[in-house]
């Protein structure tokens, strides 16, 4: 993947309130289903070993399994006393890791609704969980990234480079690095083997809520409470290559399409935006007025490989599935 920008500019000039760009591609958005049943905001979505099955975590403490083939049915997996901001599917063990705010993590056999184990980690919120093989990386509200051996459920190390929350984590296996976005407005990058910090920079004017490496591992995208979307070049030590004022309010999350040609962002401004990944060009805005979208903050996105359906989770207590069709014939 390569961003196509004017070579004379290191950073694309931001523009207020990104609007759909005219072009030859027509993007048709169809709302498919609403998944209802949670009694509080839905904060997180997580895939499983089957493309049609996904799990949600909510402020009501519920973990629920859903089937895109049976959108009217939800299957409770676990109920916890506190809210859930983070879920992670651990493929090697086919288990679901639940970040239980103010407590720690729970490892679930999600198919049989059985808890396999738990580990007290923190008295703060748990914002994100990622893994490499049998090692978990857990971002917490006290600024720590807690490194956990998932098989033995033991803490291997605590990385604390900030007193502000570690909000978002992503892994780049190509470069052997882990990027973490913090509420002190910085992004810090760590070596996966040594866990030593390799890069640190002031990335945004407010909290960094989402970091995602492009599927080829050559760029890092970041979204922030400052409403800006930025791209950083991994090969040049994370030099800035692009910046767009992408939303009116905080960017909560971003995710790539299965074919890596597009990505989506979601925001506290209640909208979802669809982007061309190579040019960082806005293609479509999905909102309540035009597509009967969410009426409150959109917190999380999951672009599934099941018929390329996009899922969005919101403060309105629902998850919505979308079909996004890219018609290049127009």
Image (cartoon, helix red, strand yellow):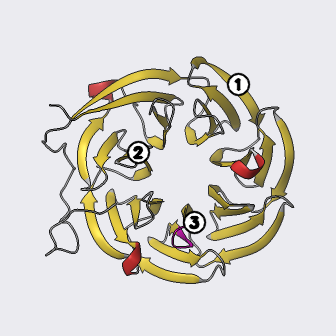
Q: Is residue 174 magenta?
A: yes
Q: Disc 2 designates what residue?
A: 259
Which range is magenta?
A: 173-179
Mark 3 in CB contact with mark 1 (< 8 angstroms):
no
Looking at this rendering, what residue extends furthest in the front direction? 329
Asked if the residue under mark 1 is in contact with the one under mark 2, i.e. CB atoms within 8 Å, the reply is: no
Q: Nearer the viewer, residue 219 or 158?
A: 219
Give the mark nearest the N terminus, 3 or 2.
3
Disc 1, SS: strand
Q: Secondary structure at mark 2?
A: loop
Distance, label 3 to label 1, CA atoms, is 31 Å
Q: Which residue is pictured at 66% across the width and 35% down the height?
A: 60
User: Where's the N terminus, which quadrant?
Assistant: bottom left
Residue 87: where, in percent of width, then height?
65, 47
Residue 320 x/y as whole percent: 47, 28
Alpha-carbon span between mark 3 and mark 2? 29 Å
Q: Which residue is mark 3?
A: 166
Give neighbour class at mark 2: few <14, some 14-19, many 20+ (Cα, 10 Å). Answer: few
**Left or right for 65, reference 198:** right
- In the image, is residue 249 above or below residue 314? below
Quarter of the image where the C terminus is located: top left
Disc on the earlier residue, 2 or 1: 1
Task: Name which quarter of the figure residue 204 lies in.
Answer: bottom left
How far apart are the two marked residues, 2 and 1, measured between alpha carbons? 30 Å
Residue where numbered disc 1 is placed: 75
Classify 252 as above or below 23.
Answer: below
Image coordinates for residue 163, horizontal then vertical, percent: 59, 74
Whether residue 48 is visible, yes or no, is yes
Residue occupying image coordinates x 56% and y 66%: 173
**Left/right of residue 148 with respect to residue 324 in the rendered view:** right
Q: Position of residue 149 (x, y in %)?
A: 79, 64
Going 79% across and 48% down the picture, which residue do you hit?
107
């Amino acid at each position: 993947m390569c961003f196509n920008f004017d070579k004379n500019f290191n950073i694309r000039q931001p523009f207020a309130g990104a609007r759909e760009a005219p072009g030859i591609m027509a993007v048709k958005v169809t709302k498919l289903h609403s998944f209802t049943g949670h009694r509080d905001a839905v904060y997180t979505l997580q895939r499983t070993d089957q493309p049609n099955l996904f799990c949600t975590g909510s402020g009501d403490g519920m973990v629920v399994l859903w089937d895109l083939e049976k959108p009217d049915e939800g299957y409770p997996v676990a109920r916890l006393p506190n809210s859930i901001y983070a879920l992670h599917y651990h493929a090697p063990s086919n288990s679901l890791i639940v970040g239980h705010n103010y407590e720690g993590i729970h490892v679930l056999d999600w198919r049989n609704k059985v808890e396999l184990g738990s580990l007290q980690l923190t008295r703060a919120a748990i914002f994100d969980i990622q893994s490499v093989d049998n090692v978990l990386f857990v971002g917490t509200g006290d600024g720590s990234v807690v490194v956990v051996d998932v098989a033995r459920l033991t803490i291997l190390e605590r990385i604390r480079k900030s007193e502000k929350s570690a909000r978002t984590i992503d892994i780049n296996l190509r470069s052997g690095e882990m990027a973490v976005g913090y509420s002190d407005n910085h992004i810090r990058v760590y070596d996966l083997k040594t866990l030593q910090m390799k890069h640190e920079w002031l990335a945004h004017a407010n909290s960094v809520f989402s970091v995602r490496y492009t599927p080829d591992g050559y760029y890092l995208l970041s979204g922030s409470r400052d409403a800006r979307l930025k791209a950083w070049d991994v090969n040049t030590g994370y030099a800035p290559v692009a910046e767009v004022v992408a939303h009116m309010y905080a960017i909560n999350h971003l995710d790539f399409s299965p074919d890596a040609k597009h990505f989506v962002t979601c925001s506290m401004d209640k909208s979802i935006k669809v982007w061309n990944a190579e040019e960082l060009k806005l293609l479509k805005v999905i909102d309540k007025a035009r597509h009967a979208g969410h009426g409150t903050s959109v917190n999380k996105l999951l672009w599934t490989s099941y018929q390329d359906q996009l899922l969005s989770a919101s403060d309105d207590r629902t998850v919505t599935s979308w079909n996004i069709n890219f018609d290049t014939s127009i």
